[in-house]
Image (cartoon, rainbow, N blue to C red):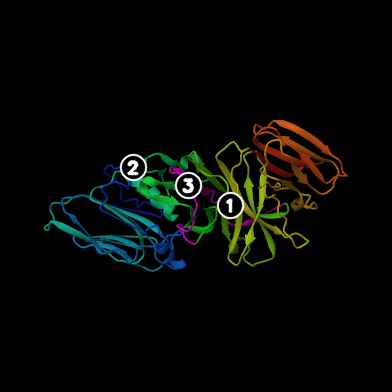
């Protein structure tokens, strides 16, 4: 019996999967594993339109246009393919089976497929009834991105590990099931994210499968891209380093991609959850990029915001920088020292530009921010700053601000305990203090009981 699974991921209901045990692709008895090499030459050899999630394809890399295998051997083949045109991917004339990006044909039976970026897996048992000793699977060398071939029939867990690896690498979501690392440990379980289980996308490193994804976008919806320390033309050109078995996964709630008025902003209805998996996964210095046309199709002169929802219920506004095609939010710190969870929630918004022709930056250079929902925007938040940061213990730091009435500065330690509260005279425009203990501190500036700016101060 032959079976095929087609993932974009989706599983054809009439077919099933099974895999003989191996722990990972590296060091396994894989007969063929063809993918783009990690080198600058490979990264620069293909045009932008041929990249799939920042990876080049393997066109012209296959020395042979077929795979030969024994009739006495079961086999499994998994591959990644995308093309806007109808294309034959492979054909096994001996078995009268063929796969295209728009159909799967076995004998007189056929199944129509959607033409889109996909992960395909095909499994077949040994068949000693064949007249010839060896059989061939012939390939069309066009728009393949990766291909893995084993002379064995995969068990479910090992097929899950391969699909998880390919899904994270190429931004092709698994529609059902958990994501697994090469060590068979669960990376991400949709059952634990029931309100946010649409279009899971990820970054991460898994040496067992040679996964090292540092920037990614979902191929079903190219609206959102997230990269570690930046977004380069190709994944290889992103110079970020990451420890093994550390991952980042994000997914959305499938709400409409429509803007809804909320106070002074037009806020996107769709929301995202981002999760950080691993002991050393970075939670700061991310670049978040969205398609400009999706939130501003008329190219109006407006301001762009990322709304980052903290686990204490507060929401931080992060300003975006626009170019002709994208809006980019730089140096995003999803989780800080005062957050108790390894996850965060976010969405995006647009609003009027500052009347002075200058967008307010609600964050200081330290990455602090003001809170979404403030009604009083008359205060120039960007003129409130803290320096230096980080600071040595017992070294003075200074906060500068416009002179104002009823200003209170509160300092909290990493455990949330109030250690200093100072009422500031309306005649002064700065505050200087020092702290004797190395730690992270939260500094709040409030006026008339309302928070106007928050800093995270590092004392080392």
Q: Earlier in the sequence, mark 3 or mark 2?
A: 2
Secondary structure mostly seen in magenta is loop
Label 3: which residue? 242
Q: Reply yes or no: does residue 240 show up in magenta.
A: yes
Horizontally, residue 96 falls left or right of residue 184, namely: left
Callout in the foreground (2, 1): 2
Helix, strand or loop under label 2: helix
Tell me how far mark 3 sits from mark 2, CA to CA: 26 Å
Residue at point 53% right, 57% down?
A: 231
Pick the front one: 170 or 368 = 368
Numbered label attached to residue 144: none
Residue underneath mark 2: 157
Q: Residues within 10 Å of mark 1 (few under 14, many from 20)?
A: some
Magenta-span inclusion, residue 48: no
Looking at the rendered structure, the secondary structure element under dot 1 is loop
User: Of 84 and 49, which appears nearest the observer?
Assistant: 49
Say whether residue 10 is left or right of residue 418: left
Specify whether 102 is left or right of 454: left
**What is the residue that sits farthest to the right in this orientation?**
427
Tag 1 or tag 2, which sits nearer the N-term? Answer: 2
Magenta span of residues: 233-262
| Residue at left offset 78%, top offset 61% | 356
- Residue identified by numbered label 1: 270
Q: CA distance from mark 3 to mark 1?
A: 29 Å
């Amino acid at each position: 019996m032959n079976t095929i699974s087609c993932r974009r991921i989706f599983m054809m209901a009439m077919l099933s999967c099974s895999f003989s045990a191996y722990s990972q692709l590296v060091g396994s008895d894989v007969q063929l594993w063809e993918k783009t090499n990690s080198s600058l030459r490979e990264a620069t050899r293909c045009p932008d339109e041929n990249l799939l999630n920042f990876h080049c394809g393997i066109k012209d890399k296959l020395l042979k246009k077929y795979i030969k295998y024994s009739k006495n051997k079961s086999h499994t083949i998994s591959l990644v393919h995308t093309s806007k045109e109808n294309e034959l991917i492979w054909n096994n004339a001996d078995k009268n089976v063929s796969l295209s990006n728009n159909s799967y044909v076995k004998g007189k039976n056929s199944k129509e497929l959607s033409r889109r970026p996909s992960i395909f897996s095909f499994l077949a048992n040994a068949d000693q009834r064949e007249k010839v000793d060896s059989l061939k699977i012939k390939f069309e060398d066009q728009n393949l991105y990766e291909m893995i071939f084993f002379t064995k029939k995969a068990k479910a867990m090992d097929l899950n590990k391969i699909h998880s690896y390919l899904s994270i690498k190429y931004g092709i979501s698994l529609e059902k099931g958990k994501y697994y690392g090469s060590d068979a440990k669960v990376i991400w379980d949709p059952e634990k994210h029931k309100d946010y289980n649409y279009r899971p996308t990820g970054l991460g490193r898994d040496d067992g499968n040679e996964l090292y994804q540092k920037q990614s976008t979902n191929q079903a919806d190219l609206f959102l891209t997230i990269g570690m320390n930046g977004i380069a033309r190709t994944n290889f050109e992103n110079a970020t380093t990451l420890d093994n078995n550390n991952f980042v996964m994000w997914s959305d709630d499938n709400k409409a991609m429509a803007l809804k008025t909320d106070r002074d902003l037009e806020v996107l209805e769709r929301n995202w959850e981002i999760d950080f998996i691993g002991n050393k996964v970075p939670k700061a210095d991310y670049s978040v990029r969205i398609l400009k046309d999706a939130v501003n199709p008329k190219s109006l002169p407006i301001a762009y915001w990322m709304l980052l929802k903290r686990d204490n219920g507060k929401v931080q506004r992060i300003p975006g920088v626009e170019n002709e095609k994208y809006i980019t939010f730089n140096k995003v710190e999803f989780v800080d020292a005062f957050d108790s969870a390894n996850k965060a929630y976010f969405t995006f918004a647009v609003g009027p530009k500052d009347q002075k022709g200058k967008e307010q930056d609600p964050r200081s250079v330290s990455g602090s921010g003001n809170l979404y929902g403030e009604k009083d925007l008359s205060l120039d938040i960007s003129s409130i700053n803290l320096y230096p940061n980080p600071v040595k213990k017992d070294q003075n730091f200074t906060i500068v601000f416009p002179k104002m009435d009823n200003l209170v500065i509160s300092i909290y330690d990493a455990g949330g305990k109030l250690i200093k509260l100072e009422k500031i005279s309306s005649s002064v425009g700065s505050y200087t203090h020092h702290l004797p203990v190395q730690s992270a501190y939260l500094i709040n500036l409030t006026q008339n009981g309302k928070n106007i700016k928050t800093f995270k101060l590092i004392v080392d």
